[in-house]
Image: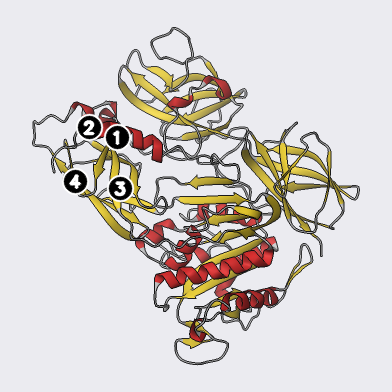
């Protein structure tokens, strides 16, 4: 189709900011949050938290933990846009996005068998830790699957017998007592109520649901592998009811699978008193309208489905946005390059290729990329830039995420990952604080009086109130004369036109211009570069996070209790609980946090007395509209 008309450039620029905003902790509405981890990678993990106007329990809905079970992840996807009158839901539609793209049970092994233990270097470790954190915020855990055949309590046929999984609600026991709290969970009784509610809407006997007790604790259980599952972890480690919801892979249509998953989730919502509108089933085929593409970091263009984009050999092509009739589950694959998900990943084109657009595992559109004849000039829009110089120098343009390692699990679940305060450098400081490790290339900073060495390509996560001194830059190869240290969006010396910020100090909360934050990041992120004229030698990144809750100190019946983020405490209904103090990660006290109990505001002046209601509620801590963390108060039985 030839070159893309310049008339589309303005449209692409508009579309880029209209449909691809920076993803943050909170949407415009204060009743929901959208959180993205591992953005732009094959393991991208999207989380949605929807809060009701009235207090109530929290239900976690997990889909896609196994990538070849679309009934589960498409059903979970439909709860994202819900509005709730009472209670809360946490939705993870696609827990294993890489396997969903491949339509495979598990690209790195079965993710649902990694919750008892997981190796440090397992690529799924980060996902498992995040899911455990979310479970710790919940009062009920539902894991959505598509299973083989039809579960029946007695043998009926090869496809309908006690060894099959489809059309059932699964629990690990009939009754379970959680040892740390003494809480007794009547799983079988609860599941049978749900099964009765589901079956009222299923006229055909062969498609009705049943309760399946895996009896996972028994030495005679046929399902001992479930001891490593997400449901078993939620039940035994957190003491919350946990169920697997299975529709049959042998149902006549995908729409029927999705609808019956919806029936099961809706029944649990009704049983737990979480009031919401039922989601709309929309299974229209995905359709690609355009891809928004940037070449060599320049102003993006919109390239329609089926068109061909012509570039020079060696140009860097980056797909910034997929314009389609769906917003979630989208990925692109630049054939022969990158990984299975190349969105927002600059890649050098040296031969003709095709960019494939997918929703989950379904390919639904493409754009071809061709090469201009040798000696031809690209349009000025795509002329070589400093990014090209980096590519020629062999520098890796992909950005590493924060390398903080999740801390060991606390009694109430693992600590949060990704944000620490005071800041932890992404590269280990040398023993001698005046010299970095041998071969170090990057930046020397001072944060809170502490020397931090930030290696080129890495990201340092800092709290909003951090004060950062830009000390110097170092490279074992040396730097050309006139090389400057430039923090984009920061004016270190008013009136200085050199762009050199070395030796200046930045207060992150007030000194950075928001328009210079990198697009497509889950938190405001700014580039710190070593620049020689117009050439970028190397760069690193500063990511600014909100405060993260460490613990809440409560007084109950005259006894103080420290609750780590996500931890649960059993309290008698009607008992007086005193909120004494709130601390952030790094043991920093928080004088005036904004608190809600079950979604309702609590006075910020501490200490503060509250009365325990007769249902589980979350004590949530906010700062500037962003959730820092929460603990759970559960009624003692």
Q: Where is residue 481? Give x, y as percent.
A: 33, 13
What residue is drawn where x is 45% and y is 90%? Answer: 158
Which residue is labeled 2 in the image? Answer: 7
For marks 1 and 3, the one nearer the N-term is 1
Asked if the residue at tag 2 contacts the one at tag 1, i.e. Cβ–Cβ closer than 8 Å, the answer is yes
For marks 2 and 4, the one nearer the N-term is 2
Q: Where is residue 267? Give x, y as percent.
A: 61, 69
Q: Nearer the viewer, mark 1 or mark 3?
A: 1
For residue 338, the mark is 3
- Regarding residue 241, the answer to whether it shows in the image is no
For marks 4 and 3, the one nearer the N-term is 4
The quadrant of the image that shows the C terminus is bottom right
Q: Secondary structure at mark 1?
A: helix
What residue is drawn where x is 66% and y is 44%? Answer: 629
Q: Whole-Å distance between the Cαs marked 1 and 2?
A: 7 Å
Tell me the quarter of the picture where residue 413 sits: bottom right
Mark 1 Cα within 10 Å, few/some/many (few <14, many 20+)? some
For residue 307, the mark is 4
């Amino acid at each position: 189709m030839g070159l893309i008309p310049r008339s589309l450039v303005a449209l692409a620029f508009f579309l880029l900011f209209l449909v691809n905003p920076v993803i943050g902790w909170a949407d415009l509405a204060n009743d929901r949050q959208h959180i993205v981890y591992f953005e732009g990678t094959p393991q991208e993990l999207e989380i949605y938290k929807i809060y009701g106007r009235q207090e109530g329990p929290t239900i976690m809905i997990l889909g896609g933990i196994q990538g070849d079970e679309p009934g589960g992840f498409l059903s979970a996807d439909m709860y994202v846009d819900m509005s709730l009158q009472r209670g809360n839901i946490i939705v993870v539609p696609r827990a294993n996005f890489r396997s969903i793209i491949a339509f495979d049970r598990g690209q790195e092994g079965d993710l649902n068998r990694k919750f008892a233990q997981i190796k440090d270097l397992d690529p799924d470790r980060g996902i498992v830790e995040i899911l455990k954190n979310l479970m710790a915020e919940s009062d009920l855990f539902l894991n959505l699957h598509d299973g083989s055949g039809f579960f029946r309590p007695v043998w009926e046929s090869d496809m309908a017998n006690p060894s099959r999984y489809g059309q059932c609600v699964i629990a690990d026991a009939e009754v379970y007592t959680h040892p740390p709290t003494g809480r007794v969970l009547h799983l079988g009784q609860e599941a049978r109520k749900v099964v009765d509610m589901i079956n009222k809407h299923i006229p055909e006997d062969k498609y009705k649901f049943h309760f399946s007790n895996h009896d996972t604790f028994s030495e005679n259980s046929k399902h001992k592998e479930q001891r490593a599952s997400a449901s078993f972890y939620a039940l035994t480690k957190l003491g919350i009811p946990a169920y697997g919801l299975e529709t049959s892979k042998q149902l006549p249509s995908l729409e029927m699978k999705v609808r019956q998953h919806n029936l099961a989730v809706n029944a649990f919502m009704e049983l737990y008193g979480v009031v919401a509108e039922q989601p709309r089933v929309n299974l229209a085929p995905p359709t690609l309208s355009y891809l928004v593409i940037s070449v060599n970091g320049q102003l993006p263009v919109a390239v329609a489905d089926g068109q061909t984009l012509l570039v020079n050999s060696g140009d860097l092509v980056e797909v910034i946005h997929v314009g389609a009739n769906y917003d979630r589950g989208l990925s692109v694959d630049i054939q022969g390059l990158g990984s299975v998900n190349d969105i927002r990943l600059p890649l050098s084109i040296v031969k003709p290729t095709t960019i494939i657009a997918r929703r989950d595992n379904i390919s639904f559109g493409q754009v071809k990329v061709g090469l201009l004849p040798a000696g031809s000039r690209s349009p000025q829009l795509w002329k070589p830039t400093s990014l090209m110089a980096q590519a020629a120098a062999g520098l890796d343009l992909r950005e590493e995420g924060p390398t903080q390692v999740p801390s060991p699990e606390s009694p109430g679940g693992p600590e949060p990952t990704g944000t620490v305060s005071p800041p932890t450098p992404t590269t280990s400081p040398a023993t001698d604080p005046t010299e970095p490790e041998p071969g170090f290339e990057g930046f020397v900073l001072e944060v809170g009086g502490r020397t931090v060495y930030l290696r080129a390509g890495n990201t340092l996560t800092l709290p909003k109130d951090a004060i950062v001194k830009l000390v110097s830059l170092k490279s074992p190869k040396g730097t050309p004369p006139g090389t400057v240290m430039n923090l984009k969006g920061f004016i270190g010396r008013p009136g200085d036109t050199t762009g050199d910020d070395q030796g200046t100090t930045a207060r992150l909360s007030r000194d950075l211009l928001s328009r210079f934050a990198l697009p497509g990041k889950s938190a405001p992120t700014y580039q710190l570069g070593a620049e020689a004229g117009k050439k970028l030698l190397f760069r690193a990144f500063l990511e600014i996070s909100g405060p993260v809750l460490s613990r809440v100190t409560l007084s109950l019946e005259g006894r103080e209790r420290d609750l780590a983020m996500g931890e649960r405490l059993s309290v008698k209904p009607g008992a007086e609980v005193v909120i004494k103090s709130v601390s952030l990660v790094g043991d920093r006290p928080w004088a005036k946090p904004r608190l809600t109990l079950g979604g309702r505001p609590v006075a910020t002046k501490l200490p503060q007395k509250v009365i325990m209601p007769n249902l589980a509620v979350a004590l949530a801590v906010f700062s500037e509209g962003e959730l820092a963390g929460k603990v759970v108060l559960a009624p003692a039985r």
